[in-house]
């Protein structure tokens, strides 16, 4: 319901925005020539079109539109898929979806293989002449056995009858399939079972039910029953062996040749044994390949083709829905279940995605017992204990109390201080954020802040001082080009699995970018400005603070923007490494359990957070350096 | 405007075409396997026995985890996965992936997959409940994940109360050496060896066996390949079982296997001594039969790793078939 109204809304929004755009062009003054930046100003309506288009693509390719408008279509296509699956083996024999008859291809291939063996054997210096002749003789016999399979005159009457019977069964099915007489009345047991199953069956996309497999419509039932019959026919067909007496005699002959020769060999004649085994396999491959004379299967093939055509024709609206509303793939059947194949599998439906996202946002659900984004009441004592280092208590003169003879421990000043610095006291509680999203955010934020705190002064210093430039240049330039992820394998070993390692990785990323941009900013300051400050009597500190720093701010802030992007990219990989929390961890675990909805949720969350960071920095840029780009 | 619309329609059309042409005809067989996981059929792989038995060339691709094998099978790039862990297979069929289990590849005791607890933590199986609240490294969604949960059940500790950190075996062994985690569950010879330098197994190999914890790797095939080239699936299983039989008879060329697995000869021999490659009859009568060992495992694991979106199947026999095993 929501999705269908949303679809209409999108269509109206796009049409409306396009019409508005047309109107705008007409009313616009036309003196803005091509290349005038005026022409790229405004255009909120195109933003609407762009995002609607994106949403529409998502709805369409995840087959959510199909689900919203035709909730039963998946079930019907599933029944058709069952027929397709039951015919897969039969169709593969004939040039219906392929270029060649399967048996033609096999004969072609095996003749080639036999030729290759003969060539290989006759030129092999490790075989003696007698053996060579024996092998080549066997191979020639195998080659001669093929015509016994492909010549009409050797075909046994019984085999022909069996094939004819199967052909007729398919033809009967083809004739009766489009009529109302199909399916024939169901047996009571079957009907009871079906109805029972149907009453329990959930809809398409319900939790835990991808595609409801039992036929829900009359047309679907037709396909379901036909698939059952075809499966039987297919199984019976592949049990037919075109092993006429002449062929049998020859293969038995070949087999005994191989066996006789094998018995003569010692166990250490490995080359000969393998060759014989391979030749034996080649013979068996031909034996069980369903090879028939070229004309024997003509009617059978026609029957399969006819049925295929009829079942395609009978699909009617199902086929249209399949082609139009299930782009890029379809529903496939695999035994008793049906599954989405193509974008429907890896691109989850927006409705499911948002439902699961909303569910995950509930603090009681979360992901792996950790909420996505929530708060926790935490005592101020813990924060104090975390901030104050424990050694403060150790350096206070005196000793920690010792228990007295009556079993009491009397706290003294030193132990009281220890209680404070370790956070072991009662205090009021404040809410602190927790969860996967918060953890990821905090890691990026801290990595960035440390990078800025260290990188900016160092960069400016390097831009102004010969010693600093010379001393730090090799260091920075050597580590800067290394992709941050190259450090990743070391991080666990050196820093362990906690936040320290991940934050350090992000710090490495942001540090180099900050150094480079601050240095460029500092060395790019116009000399005239510095001279002016000098002549006005500014001190070194004043020049640094009032001239050089503001002048390098644009470079620094651009550097921060670049660093944010890089940090997000690195974070996910860092959280893949060893994770207990974080967006990257969620994505990695979801991948292992094939939860595509969760994967897309993490991608979406990361995009949103990245955007949030970027917008914040853009706002800061506008506030702090309004002169940028204006002279 | 017309140009924009035709561009958009054109690109949608092109995208549809691009996505739907995934499969190609079987003029080669594409098989997935693991490195550092020595199996007898690697000799057949090196000697091109498979290529000759199929009559078409074989393309072997190595993967890091069974989950990645599933992903490649779904995208149509792999036909047969050899030695996929049962856990990733279960996760795949729970997610309704169209793949089938056709053979048992390897049975292994806890020599190859195990949980190692750090000596410094002072925890043994007697006081294993002390692990609750501590950090443990587990590669989630793998056989080691299963072993972790089963081991904790066996020693009476609550796995849910531990702080599970998702780590690959290499990282997990580094973490336990560093003292970052109290316990690491791992697979692969090198990682376990490294972890054992600072810790010991929670359950010894024999204890794990007694508790009924064992690893099973399987052979899985895409449904489409199975329907279209059933003969090739049989051939693959046949050649593999021939190599297994040769190995049981002590006729495998270990140096070839070691080289292909990317391990030293000693490590290979050590690893393979903990592996069992059952013959077709045993598989049919003890593992893949109704109520067989494999079927019980599938049920237990299926429920263990079920999620709300991907619940356990009611009947796992629908994704298992013995039709392609060599006859009795």
Image: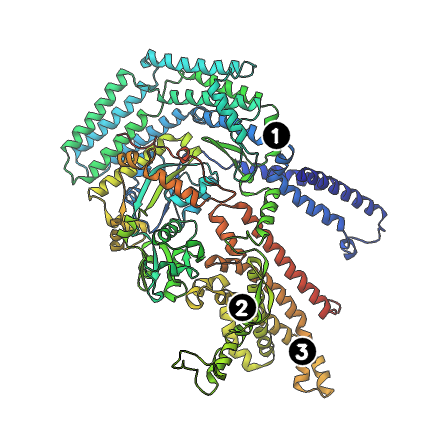
Is the residue A320 above or below the residue A205 in the image?
above
Q: Kindly indicate whether the residues beneath marks 3 and 2 are on one polypeptide chain.
A: yes
Numbered disc in front, either 1 or 3: 1
- Please rate how many residues cluster around mark 2, counting C-alpha atoms within 10 Å: few if below 14, some from 14 to 19, many from 20: many
Q: Which of the 4 image quarters holds residue A178?
A: top right
Q: Which residue is mark 3?
A: A548
Chain-order first, disc 2 or disc 1? 1
- Residue A290 image position (x, y, % from top left): 36, 23
Residue B267 is drawn in which quadrant?
bottom left
Image vertical order of residue A378 relative to residue B258, above or below:
below
Tag 3 subunit: A
**Residue B216 falls left or right of residue A249:** right
- Percent position of residue B62, x then y: 38, 47
Give the Cα separation between the discs numbered 3 and 2.
25 Å
How packed mark 3 is, by other alpha carbons closer than 10 Å (few <14, some 14-19, many 20 or more), is many
**A327 or A392, which lies in front?**
A392
For residue A475, the mark is: none
Q: CA distance from mark 2 to mark 1?
A: 52 Å
Answer with mark 3 or mark 2, whichever residue precedes in sequence: 2
Instruction: Answer left or right for A2 relative to A284.
Output: right
Q: Is residue B104 above or below residue B162?
A: above
Q: How far across and down, in percent of the image, does residue A137 sit?
A: 22, 27
Residue A507 numbered tag: 2
**Observer able to see residue A122:** no
Which quadrant of the figure contains the C terminus of chain B?
A: top left
Vertical position of residue B73 compared to residue A98: above or below: below
The residue that label 1 is drawn on is: A321
Q: Secondary structure at mark 3?
A: helix
Marks 2 and 1 close (CB-CB < 8 Å): no
């Amino acid at each position: 319901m929501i999705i269908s109204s949303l679809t209409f809304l999108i269509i109206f929004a796009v049409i409306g925005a396009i019409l508005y755009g047309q109107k705008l062009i007409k009313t616009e003054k036309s003196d803005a020539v091509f290349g005038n930046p005026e022409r790229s100003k405004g255009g909120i309506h195109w933003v609407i079109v762009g995002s609607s288009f994106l949403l529409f693509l998502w709805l369409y390719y995840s087959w959510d539109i199909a689900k919203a408008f035709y909730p039963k279509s998946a079930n019907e296509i599933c029944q058709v898929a069952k027929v397709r699956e039951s015919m897969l083996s039969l169709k593969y024999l004939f040039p219906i979806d392929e270029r060649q008859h399967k048996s033609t291809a096999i004969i072609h291939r095996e003749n080639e293989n036999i030729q290759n063996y003969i060539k290989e054997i006759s030129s092999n210096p490790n075989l003696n002449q007698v053996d060579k002749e024996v092998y080549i003789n066997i191979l020639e016999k195998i080659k001669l056995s093929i015509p016994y399979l492909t010549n009409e005159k050797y075909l046994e009457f019984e085999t022909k009858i069996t094939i004819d019977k199967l052909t007729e069964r398919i033809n009967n099915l083809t004739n009766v399939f489009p009529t109302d007489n199909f399916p024939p009345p169901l047996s009571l047991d079957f009907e009871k079972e079906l109805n029972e199953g149907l009453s329990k069956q959930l809809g398409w996309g319900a939790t835990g039910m991808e595609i409801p497999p039992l036929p829900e419509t009359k047309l679907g039932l037709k396909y379901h029953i036909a698939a059952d019959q075809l499966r039987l026919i297919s199984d019976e067909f592949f049990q037919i062996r075109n092993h006429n007496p002449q062929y049998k005699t020859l293969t038995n002959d070949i087999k005994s040749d191989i066996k006789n020769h094998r018995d003569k060999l010692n166990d250490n004649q490995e080359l000969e044994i393998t060759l014989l085994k391979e030749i034996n396999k080649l013979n068996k491959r031909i034996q069980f390949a369903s090879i028939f004379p070229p004309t024997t299967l003509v009617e059978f093939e026609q029957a399969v083709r006819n049925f295929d055509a009829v079942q395609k024709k009978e699909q009617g609206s199902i086929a249209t829905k399949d082609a139009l509303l299930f782009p890029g793939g379809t529903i496939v059947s695999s035994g008793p279940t049906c599954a989405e194949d193509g974008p429907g599998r890896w691109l989850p439906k927006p409705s499911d995605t948002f439902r699961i996202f909303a569910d995950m946002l509930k603090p009681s659900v979360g992901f792996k017992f950790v909420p996505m984004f929530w708060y926790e009441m935490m005592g101020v004592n813990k924060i104090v204990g975390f901030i104050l280092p424990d050694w403060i208590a150790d350096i206070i003169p005196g000793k920690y109390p010792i228990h007295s003879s009556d079993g009491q421990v009397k706290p003294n000043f030193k132990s009281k201080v220890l209680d404070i610095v370790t956070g072991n006291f009662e205090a009021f509680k404040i809410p602190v954020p927790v969860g996967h999203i918060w953890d990821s955010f905090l890691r990026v934020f801290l990595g960035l802040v440390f990078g800025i705190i260290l990188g900016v002064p160092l960069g400016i210093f390097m831009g102004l001082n010969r010693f600093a430039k010379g001393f730090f240049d090799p260091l920075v330039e050597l580590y800067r080009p290394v992709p941050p992820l190259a450090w990743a394998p070391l991080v666990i070993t050196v820093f362990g699995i906690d936040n320290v390692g991940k934050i350090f990785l992000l710090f490495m990323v942001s540090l180099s970018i900050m150094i480079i941009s601050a240095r460029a900013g500092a060395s790019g300051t116009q000399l005239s400005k510095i001279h002016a400050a000098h002549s006005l009597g500014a001190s070194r500190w004043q020049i640094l603070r009032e001239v050089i720093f503001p002048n390098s701010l644009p470079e620094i802030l651009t550097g921060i923007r670049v660093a944010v992007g890089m940090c997000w990219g690195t974070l996910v990989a860092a959280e893949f490494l060893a994770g207990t929390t974080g967006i990257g961890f969620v994505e990695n675990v979801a991948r292992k359990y094939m939860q595509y909805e969760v994967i897309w949720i993490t991608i979406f969350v990361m995009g949103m957070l990245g955007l949030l960071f970027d917008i914040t920095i853009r706002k800061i840029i506008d506030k702090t350096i309004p002169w940028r780009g204006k002279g | 405007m017309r140009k924009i619309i035709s561009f958009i329609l054109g690109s949608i059309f092109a995208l549809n075409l691009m996505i739907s042409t995934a499969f190609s005809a079987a003029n080669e067989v594409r098989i997935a396997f693991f490195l550092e996981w020595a199996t007898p059929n690697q000799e057949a792989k090196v000697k091109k026995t498979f290529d000759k038995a199929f009559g078409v060339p074989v393309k072997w691709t190595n993967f890091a985890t069974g989950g990645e094998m599933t992903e490649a099978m779904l995208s149509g790039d792999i036909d047969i996965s050899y030695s996929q862990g049962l856990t990733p297979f279960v996760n795949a069929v729970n997610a309704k992936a169209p793949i089938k289990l056709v053979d048992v590849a390897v049975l292994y005791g806890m020599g190859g997959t195990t949980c190692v607890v750090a000596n410094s933590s002072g925890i043994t199986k007697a006081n294993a409940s002390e692990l609750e609240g501590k950090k443990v490294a587990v590669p989630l969604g793998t056989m080691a994940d299963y072993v972790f949960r089963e081991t904790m059940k066996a020693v009476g500790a609550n796995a849910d109360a531990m702080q599970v950190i998702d780590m690959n075996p290499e990282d997990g062994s580094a973490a336990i050496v560093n003292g970052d985690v109290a316990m690491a569950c791992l697979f692969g010879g090198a990682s376990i060896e490294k972890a054992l330098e600072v810790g010991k197994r929670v359950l010894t190999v024999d204890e794990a066996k007694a508790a009924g914890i064992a690893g099973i790797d399987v052979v899985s095939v895409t449904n489409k390949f199975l329907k279209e080239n059933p003969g090739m699936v049989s051939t693959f299983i046949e050649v593999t079982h021939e190599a297994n039989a040769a190995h049981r008879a002590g006729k495998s060329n270990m140096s070839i296997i070691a080289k292909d697995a990317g391990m030293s000869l000693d490590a290979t021999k050590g690893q393979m001594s903990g592996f069992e490659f059952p013959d077709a009859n045993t598989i049919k009568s003890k593992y893949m039969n109704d109520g067989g060992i494999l079927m019980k495992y599938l049920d237990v694991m299926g429920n263990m790793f079920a999620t709300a979106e991907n619940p356990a199947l009611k009947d796992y026999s629908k994704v298992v078939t013995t039709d392609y095993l060599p006859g009795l």
